[in-house]
């Protein structure tokens, strides 16, 4: 199976300036993401999709491949779809965010496991058990609940579900990376943004609102995603172990 991994990487950030080029333990963040993804044997090709000449130059300089895309593209998955059109032979397309420097190759394998097993979900995503004590009420922690077939019922920044009575209901912490069946990605790119997507600022809700399914694949742990100066400080001391 041919799997393309696209890493959308924009220079602009509302929270952390020039985020893809921030130094983490001696090398830029986008280099961490690219190199870790490239170590995943399940992937056929890894490319960076960017609107920045500076990012493209860096990626090309380390022997990678960068593709320039329109800076006005709305979301990361929309940017990924534009790049996917350049590779018609690819059957599955991954959207790996450029702020996941410590992504592990086996996490990408877990993300595409249904496709490798011969299944054909519209798309997949990754999640791990939510820390209910510290993250349940945190808006920055995106929660996902699933049906019995491991398809997402809903993603939210709010604490879901509401526990009216004491019960053990699994709640998962969503990681913002996705894999798409190629033909579905071509459908997705033509879908308009939806009300819940805009309300929660979660692009994956566009899929659910249009009646499609997202398979949630599970991993055991979280990565350190870089969105704030505090997380950047943590990254300098983070011990990456595959």
Image (cartoon, rainbow, N blue to C red):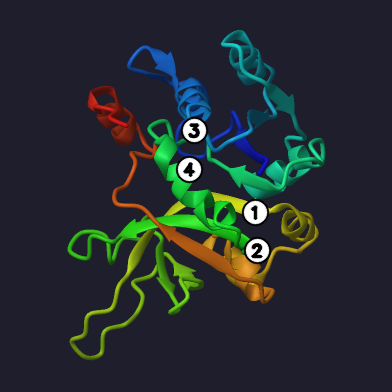
Tell me the CA gap for discs 4 and 1.
13 Å
Q: Residues within 10 Å of mark 1 (few under 14, many from 20)?
A: many
Distance between the Cα atoms at labels 4 and 3? 7 Å
Which quadrant is home to the N terminus? top right
How packed mark 3 is, by other alpha carbons closer than 10 Å (few <14, some 14-19, many 20 or more), is some
Rounded to the nearest angstrom, the CA distance separating label 2 from label 1 is 6 Å
Look at 23% across and 60% down and name the residue there: 131
Mark 4 crowd level (few <14, some 14–19, many ≥20, 10 Å Cα): many
> Which is in the foreground here, disc 3 or disc 2?
3
The first of marks 3 and 1 along the sequence is 3
Q: Please say whether residue 75 is visible from this viewpoint.
A: no
**Res 127 → quadrant:** bottom left
Q: Along the line of sight, which residue is nearer the eye, 56 or 3?
A: 3
Separation of marks 4 and 2 at Cα, in angstroms: 17 Å
For the residues labelled 4 and 3, say whether their Cβ atoms are less than 8 Å apart. yes
Q: Look at mark 2 in the image and give the residue it sits on.
A: 122
Dot 3 falls on a residue whose secondary structure is loop
| Disc 2 and disc 1 in contact, CB within 8 angstroms | yes
Q: Which residue is mark 3?
A: 40
| Horizontal side of residue 138 vs 122, given as left or right | left
Mark linked to residue 108: 4
Secondary structure type for disc 2: loop
Q: Position of residue 233 (x, y in %)?
A: 28, 27
Query: Which residue is label 1 attached to?
Result: 180
């Amino acid at each position: 199976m041919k799997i393309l991994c696209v890493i959308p990487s924009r220079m602009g950030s509302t929270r952390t300036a020039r985020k893809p080029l921030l130094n983490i333990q001696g090398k830029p963040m986008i280099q961490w993401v690219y190199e870790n993804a490239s170590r995943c044997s399940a992937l056929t090709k890894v490319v960076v999709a960017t609107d920045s000449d500076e990012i493209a130059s860096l990626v090309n300089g380390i022997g990678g491949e960068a593709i320039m895309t329109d800076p006005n593209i709305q979301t990361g998955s929309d940017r990924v779809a534009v790049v996917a059109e350049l590779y018609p032979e690819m059957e599955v397309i991954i959207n790996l965010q450029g702020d996941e420097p410590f992504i592990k190759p086996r996490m990408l394998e877990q993300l595409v496991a249904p496709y490798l097993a011969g299944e054909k979900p519209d798309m997949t995503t990754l999640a791990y058990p939510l820390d209910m004590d510290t993250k349940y009420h945190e808006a920055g922690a995106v929660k996902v609940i699933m049906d019995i077939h491991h398809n997402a019922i809903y993603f939210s920044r709010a604490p879901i579900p509401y526990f009216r009575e004491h019960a053990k209901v699994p709640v998962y912490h969503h990681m913002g990376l996705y894999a798409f069946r190629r033909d579905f990605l071509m459908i997705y790119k033509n879908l308009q943004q939806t009300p819940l997507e805009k309300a929660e600022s979660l692009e994956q809700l566009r899929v659910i609102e249009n009646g499609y399914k997202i398979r949630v694949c599970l991993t055991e742990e979280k990565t350190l995603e870089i969105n704030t100066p505090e997380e950047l400080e943590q990254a300098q001391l983070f011990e990456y172990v595959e």
